[in-house]
Image: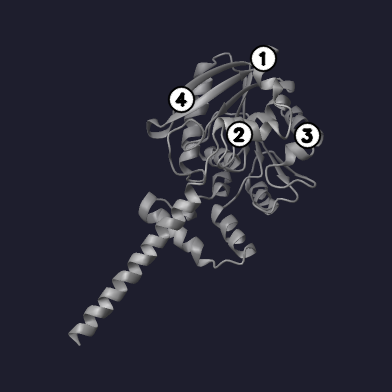
Amino acid sequence: MKKKGIVLAAAVLLLAGCVVGGSFVMASYVMTGTRQTLSEAMEWQSERYDTGFYGELEKTDYTVSGYEEYTLHVELLKNPVPTDKYIILSHGYTDNRIGSLKYVPMYLRLGYNCVVYDLRGHGENDSFVTTYGLLESRDLKLLIEDTRQRYPELSELGLHGESLGAATTITALKYKPEIDFVVADCGFASIEDVLRNGQKNANMPGFLVDLADLGMRLRYHCSMKEMRPVEALSGNQIPILFLHGSDDTFIPPSQSEQMYGRTQGQAEIHMIEGAGHAESVLVNPDIYEEYVSAFLAKLH
């Protein structure tokens, strides 16, 4: 009996070890995707639209101290036409500040200086896991404060986010930042819902998401249950324009619809027909700019 007890205990410990080990692997997979370098991102962007404007802009590179003094690499793209309006653009997962360039010509035409930056763990920043808006939003809060202090002539400040950047932007609203508007493109309301939907579409067992969540709790001290940008919208009064590609299968349009339904401030939502994930401004740049321009006109 004693021998059987030892064998059983060993089996339980082995199983527990496998579960914990598997959870660490899944958490790492979900939170540390392969990041693009700045040059790789520029090559990707240049293959899809004309990035020649970037080299002609007056640029200023600097760093900002984010949450818990994490260093963020930031770049100001100055509008050739003098303006005191600014917008901060947040890129998507595994991308970097170069990925925000596809929105810059539009905002230059609309009269804004553009502040682009690398989210934590991306671009030129030090390696770090992605927390799907939790820590990223704290960084953005401090970047907003820095932007207002660094450019004292500033008269208007907006935020634009794509995918993870949109989720980060929406989550930051819970800190009641001093901003004038938000444009949220293909963001998620809940990363857990997105991952479970992806597992289902790939015919993979749902317990893998549970394993990843366990690993997040054990290794990184956070949970998918906390990664819900939609919760930051309760009581929000900052105007938000939600945009989403109608053919987005990675983050379904219903995620933006959920957030649109939650906010209490002025809001609009538009689907860009035929666009997949983070493709809207590339698939139909004219209608994209029309939506943004019309939304901003209503705020003035």
Q: Position of residue 178 (x, y in %)?
A: 55, 28
The one of 126 and 217 positioned closer to us in this rendering: 126
Residue farthest toward the left in the current orientation of the protein:
2
Q: Which label is found at residue 24?
A: none
Label 4, label 2: how far apart the Cα atoms are: 22 Å
**Residue at 58%, 20% in the rendered image:** 76
Q: Say which element carries label 1.
A: loop
Q: Say which element carries label 3.
A: helix
The one of 135 and 55 positioned closer to us in this rendering: 55
Amino acid carrying label 2: it is Ala
Mark 4 or mark 3, which has the lower sequence index?
4
- The answer to whether 263 appears left or right of 144 in the picture is right
Q: Mark 3 points at which residue?
A: 285
Count neighbours of disc 2 (C-alpha within 10 A) and say few if under 14, some if 14 to 19, many if 20 or more.
some
Label 1, label 4: how far apart the Cα atoms are: 22 Å
Mark 1 or mark 4, which has the lower sequence index?
4
Q: Say which element carries label 4.
A: strand
**Residue at 39%, 49% in the rendered image:** 220
Amino acid carrying label 1: it is Thr
**Residue at 49%, 32% in the rendered image:** 141
**Residue at 40%, 56% in the rendered image:** 24
Of the two numbered discs 3 and 2 in the rendering, the one whose residue sits closer to the viewer: 2
Mark 1 or mark 2, which has the lower sequence index?
2
Count neighbours of disc 3 (C-alpha within 10 A) and say few if under 14, some if 14 to 19, many if 20 or more.
some
Q: Mark 1 points at which residue?
A: 83
Q: Mark 2 points at which residue?
A: 41
Q: Where is residue 19 in the image (x, y as percent from the top left)?
A: 39, 65
Residue 90 visible (yes or no): no
Q: Where is residue 20 in the image (x, y as percent from the top left)?
A: 37, 62
Mark 3 or mark 2, which has the lower sequence index?
2
Q: Position of residue 93 (x, y in %)?
A: 56, 42
Q: Name the residue under label 4.
A: 64
